[in-house]
Amino acid sequence: MTFTRTWYDGISYSHPGRHPGYISIVKYPEYEKLPLGFDLKQNYPNPFNSITNISYTLSEPAHVELSVYNMLGQKIATLFDGEMSAGTHSDRWDAQNVPSGIYFLKLNVGNNSIIRKALVAR
C-alpha cells in the first residue's frame, strides 16, 4: 500500500482504499503540532487588579526564565526559572503586593527573549 501525504499539518495522510475511486483518510491526533519557535502571549486579563495569566509556547525543551520588571528595569519577581518541555505552558502572577503601574513580563529562552507590557490597575 502506498501512502501519499496530502495535507501539510504533519499528521494527516491519505492512501488509496480497497475500492477504486475511494480515498481513506488517516489522522494521528496523538501528535500535537508544536510551534515553530517560542512565543510569549499577552497576559490576560490586561489591565488587571491582582492576578493575571501568562502563557508561552516552546518548540523544543529549553531552559526558561519568566520574570517581571518594573519601569526602572528592576526585577521584582521570577515566576519560573528552570527546564521546560516543548508545548504550551502558563503561569500566574499575583501582583497584589505591587503598586498600580506598568510592568514588563520577560521570557528568556536560551539567548533570546520576548517582552510584553502588563498594566496593574487598582
Image (cartoon, rainbow, N blue to C red):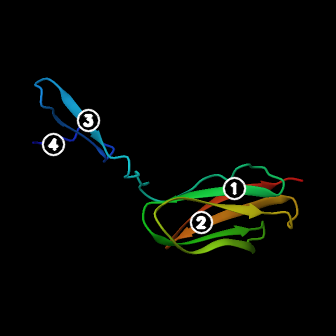
The residue that mark 2 highlights is 107
The residue that mark 1 highlights is 53
Q: What residue is shown at x 37% (from left), y 46% (from top)?
A: 29
Tell me the mark number nearer the camera, choosing from 1 and 2.
Answer: 1
Q: What residue is shown at x 32% (from left), y 46% (from top)?
A: 28
Amino acid type, residue under disc 1 in the picture: Asn
Mark 4 vs 2, N-terminal side: 4
Amino acid type, residue under disc 3 in the picture: Ile
Tell me the mark number nearer the camera, choosing from 3 and 1.
Answer: 3
- Residue 75 percent coordinates (x, y): 73, 74
Q: CA distance from mark 3 to mark 1?
A: 38 Å
Q: Secondary structure at mark 2?
A: strand
Q: CA distance from mark 4 to mark 1?
A: 43 Å
- Residue 12 percent coordinates (x, y): 29, 42
Q: What residue is shown at x 68% (from left), y 53% (from top)?
A: 43
Q: CA distance from mark 4 to mark 2?
A: 41 Å
The residue that mark 4 highlights is 3
Amino acid type, residue under disc 4 in the picture: Phe
Label of residue 109 in the image: none
Q: CA distance from mark 1 to mark 2?
A: 14 Å
Q: In the current view of this chain or complex, which residue is farthest to the top?
A: 21
| CB-based contact (under 8 Å), mark 4 and mark 3 | no
Mark 3 vs 1, N-terminal side: 3
Number of other residues with Cα within 10 Å of mark 3, as a class: few under 14, some 14 to 19, many 20 or more: few
Q: CA distance from mark 2 to mark 3?
A: 40 Å
